[in-house]
Image (cartoon, rainbow, N blue to C red):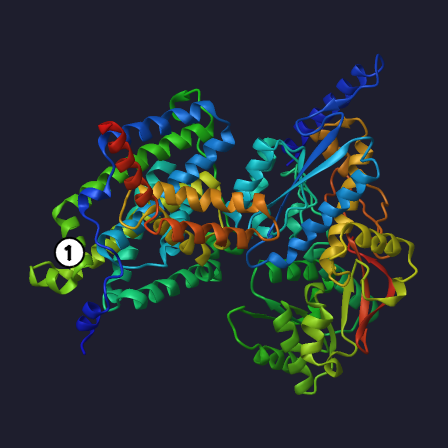
Amino acid sequence: MSAAEEVVTEGQAVEAVPKRAMTLGYGTSLVVLVALIITPLLVKNFIIFQMTMLLIYGLAVLALNILTGGSGQFSLGQSAFYAVGAYTSAILMEHANMNYALTLPIAGIICFGFGYLFGKPALRLSGVYLALATFALATAMPQLLKLGFFEHWTGGVQGLVVTKPDAPFGLPMSQDMWLYYFTLVITIGIYLASVNLLRSRSGRAFMAIRDNEIAASAMGVDVALYKTLAFGVSAGITGVAGGLGAIAVQFVAPDGYTITLAISLFLGMVVGGVGWLPGSIVGSAFIIFVPNIAEGISKGLSGAVFGVLLFLVIFLVPHGARQVAIVATQLFGKLKKN
Amino acid sequence: MMAARLPLAALSTAFVLLAATCSGAEAQKTYDTGASDSEIRIGNIMPYSGPASGYGVIGKTEAAYFAMVNAEGGINGRKIKFISYDDAYSPPKTVEQARKLVESNEVLLIFNSLGTAANGAIQKYMNTKKVPQLFVASGASKWNDPANFPWTMGWQPSYQDEARVYAKFIMKEKPEAKVGVLFQNDDFGKDYLKGLKNGFGDKAAMIVLEESYETSESAIDNHVVKLKAAGADTLITIATPKFTAQAIKKAAEIGWQPLHIVSNVSASVGGVLQPAGFENAQGILSASYLKDGSDPQWDHDAGMMKFLAFLQKYEPDANKLDGAVVFGYAAAQTLAKVLQMCGDDLTRANVMKQAASLKGVELDTLLPGITVNTSATDFAPIKQLRMMRFKGQKWELFGDIISADLGH
């Protein structure tokens, strides 16, 4: 049995999501956007910081969503791309005194290249094997960052402290608030670009590969090219998220980018709904706030409480936030009719 | 450096003046965020989950200690509200939790947060916010830097201090020694090595070979052989438990019996010496500053009896043999002492000022003779250790208290 046949008989790992179901309606989008713009004006700096982290992890989950939900490839190595992005930004800011905003596209491009190159050999793998290969990447990354060879730039185990940018043009805004709006603009930009990508010819190619690789290649889709491209795009977005994360947290250290982060992002994607882009932000909220809730319930058993909550979510709404959204829309439709 | 120190000095002088002018009419009570007539809010961050969750017991012991303080009427009539969060040993999470404590829970200070990277992540934030990052639970020496980080203070003896103690011991007991150093090639190992060289001073030539290994190596046998071949008759092993056990075993295998000193990090009987084989570990030296819960010589020690009574009543499920419990108790006792000294002036500036004026403070679980000492230029509270020798199946303390200060 050839490898290609194995893929076909393996059954579909990722459920096919029609492309229209990948986004929100205009009305809902507008409401969410207004909420995201207004809330920071009303809350404390700490909450603004948490909301910034929400957007940043949301971006990272979105990137994974494009890879898994879009092109059907698994990755447990997103933390590695996130780390590369974070370190790129931090090193450029602290050693080359570069403006923080300029470091982000560089972080994105470096990660795109990194992801694209990693995607090349990974092409030969699929499903769980690909997941394992990316897992290896995630496990290796923190140790690579500690290597003495790079220590001059990375700061080794001690990490690097990053200076937080002030609001430009003398805007009367706290650093946290400025960074939030800065992140928000980038997030919206990347979100719109991602939606467009998935609706474009390339996006259709991604989904064709996800749904049936052989059929896709029979239709003339360059499977190798689009698979690596998906990897590259996903890594690039994750890199930008990592760079933003470094600026928001003001610190990078190898211990911040372990396999736990990769698994969190994966978790966020599943909870948000695989292949449903707006779910990324819900997934991100889950990985940021639920551990805090779990800790509030029991300190000693926070891990167990988190596990129970996660289990409940998967059991009750296996398709994550997307399922909740669909049910809500249906209810809303019924109410309208009555 | 001077420039950085001056404004602080000016500030504290201004503060003292201000406090002096305010007094008189009424007994003044000054508070910063986090303190009031009825309570003092203290923040803490511990790895209750994740790879270092074994240390979580420190936070639990501290919580229990403050429960005892509250049950006995609090500090100067104020109850302690001890808020401890989990950071899973991940620096970004530490930042989130620190900000939550400072900005949302509005604590007066963050106390004994654990981990070198975790504290490194919040050091700048805490100093910008001017919130005390008090008694950091990490052995790095960088917490003792009052000129640049006046709001951060360490607590336990730093790796460098411990290394200086070994250097002093060797120079006194074995002045002709040829020292071989086996160290882990990371910040932990390098910090130690720096302290050693610093301690030997102009006698640094006593070190005949510095041999490093990477944590990624599976065995360090060849390094031990190399050190023996270099003619060393004294071996200092600066390694984590697993590698220390290997070094002890290998030295015995090749019939090498140097004067062997292992770092306090790897002085665990169960975790290092037993796996290495008790017969191979006889006569090995290390140093300590806390009383050992398993040592019968403290059975009738007043401080230890207080500690055990506390465990029985407030933390009955804790293991008295666990060094982390003894550690947490002593750290919490130090903070209680500082808050007591603050009196009714519970401002963040005064907390740092009092924390920097500890003189000869004794703690229940510190070895007798070891005291807590700080000053405006010295943010390393514990700098003394006592040597110990492994005999039979346990450590035996010997000799005098050795101070890490180079002067005396």
Which of the image's four quarters has the C terminus of chain B?
bottom right
Q: Residue furthest front?
A: A338
* Rendering coords of residue B236 (x, y %): 69, 70
Front residue (pair B221, B391): B391
Q: Quadrant of residue B184?
A: bottom right
Task: Report in which chain the residue with disc 1 lies.
Answer: A
Relative to residue B165, is residue B303 drawn left or right? right
Count of marks overlaid on the render? 1
Q: Quadrant of residue B256?
A: bottom right
Mark 1 Cα shell of 10 Å, populated few (<14), some (14-19), many (≥20): many
Relative to residue A253, is residue B312 drawn left or right? right
Front residue (pair B32, A276): A276
Q: What residue is rendered at 92% in x and 60% in y?
A: B300
Relative to residue A326, is residue A18 drawn left or right? left
> What residue would you read off at disc 1?
A208
* Rendering coords of residue A95 (x, y %): 43, 45
